[in-house]
Image (spheres, helix red, strand yellow):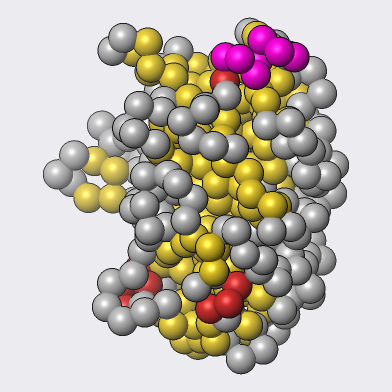
Amino acid sequence: MNSLAKKARWAGSLMVAGVLLVTGAGAAAADQAPEVPGATAVGWRSLGLAVSPDGTRAYVVAWDRVGSDLSVVLRTVDTRTGTVVARLALADTGTAGRPVVSPDGSRLYVVVSEQLVAVSTATNTVLSRTPAPDQPRPAGWSQGRLTGLAVSRDGARVYVDQYGPYGLNQGVGTGRVLVFSTGQDAFTSTVPVGGYQVDSIAVAPNGGAAYVSTDQGLFHLDTGGAVPAVARVVDRLGASTELAPSPDGTRLYALGWQTGSGTGYEVDTARDTARPAVTFGSGWVDVHFVSVSPDGRRLYVLKDGWAPKASVLSFDTATNTGVPAETLTGFALDGVSDAAVGPDGHTLYVVGLHGGDGSYLKTVGF
């Protein structure tokens, strides 16, 4: 296993994904974290990380704590200097999900307290806040929460996963995918999918399809038409929560409840069939943030993110075997809540806790 001081032969990146501007020396003084070498303070508890397509910006959504109150804040970090260059308050209370950035880097999208928030990355301002359309449900039931996000290859649509509705001690309903038009700043259609839990969505490289993970199966959506529709279901793959397509679109890798047995799945997208492909260990294994390198040769996952022993694992996709020499570990944090490798393929970003008092973004070249 390599430490961060050693080189890893990575060729790709983990797919990532009122305003107060603070720039220059003031931002550095306020946000640098000398007790965590090479790190930038990004809030009390980080909620998600995304990296710009050109790798010059990292976006961290986090809770800031003021007394007993928690506010949701987006910080923009200049990855070349490690300083916070913008701070945007997203909500006084509530929670948020993992952000995603549009393919051209001009917009960032994040779910905040059951609204889809669109942010201009050029002006660091909120462009729109759009609540989810009403979800059909019995009287007295509550709407399901919004979860996974993905942006279409042309930037014209944002796909938003939503859990099914639920009634206290009465059961749950079926989830769906919401389609948001970035030109209209509005939700324009919905796609029902089987299962209550709808966790992740991955857009195919050709832009004509998307895959949605649920507790009842992996759903293949045809996104080529005016309104997306379910094309078929990958029957053997249920309870998946995290997805990543290969660059050529021929394969899709999935994590989920199956990782309780230490296994990741590979989907043949031409046939929509799944098979166990990658072994992360025996018994229950904590792995997240699956991704494929741009050349398709490597699969990456974060293992044991909740512990100081957190590591980023590398797998050879030709043989579906681990490459221990390319493992990265030793981040000097109490745990890693999110991870990404920049588009240059030589920069690793991790966000995690240190000392229990705050979250930090750490940038490591390799």
Percent across and percent down for residue 269 are: 66, 80
Residue toward you, 217 or 58: 58
Which residue: 57% across, 20% down? 31
Q: Is residue 192 visible?
A: no
Q: Is residue 130 left or right of residue 286?
A: right
**Residue 357 image-quadrant placement:** top left
Q: Is residue 325 above or below residue 115?
A: below
Q: Residue 267, percent across and down? A: 58, 80
Q: Residue at x 49, y 82 (%)?
A: 278
Query: Residue at left 53%, top 63%?
Result: 3
Q: Is residue 6 magenta?
A: no
**Which SS does the magenta portion mostly show?**
helix
Instruction: Answer left or right for 93 relative to 362.
Output: left
Look at the image and tell me in which quarter the C terminus lies. Answer: bottom right
Which of these two is toward me, 72 or 22?
22
Task: Pinpoint residue 16: horizontal percent, then vertical percent.
Answer: 65, 51
State whether residue 230 is above or below residue 135: below
Point 18% across, 39% down: residue: 168
The correct choice, above or below, for 85 with respect to 342 in the image is above
Q: Is residue 69 visible?
A: yes
Which stretch did the figure color magenta? 24-30
- 229 and 3: which one is in front? 3
Rendered position, 112 above or below 88? below
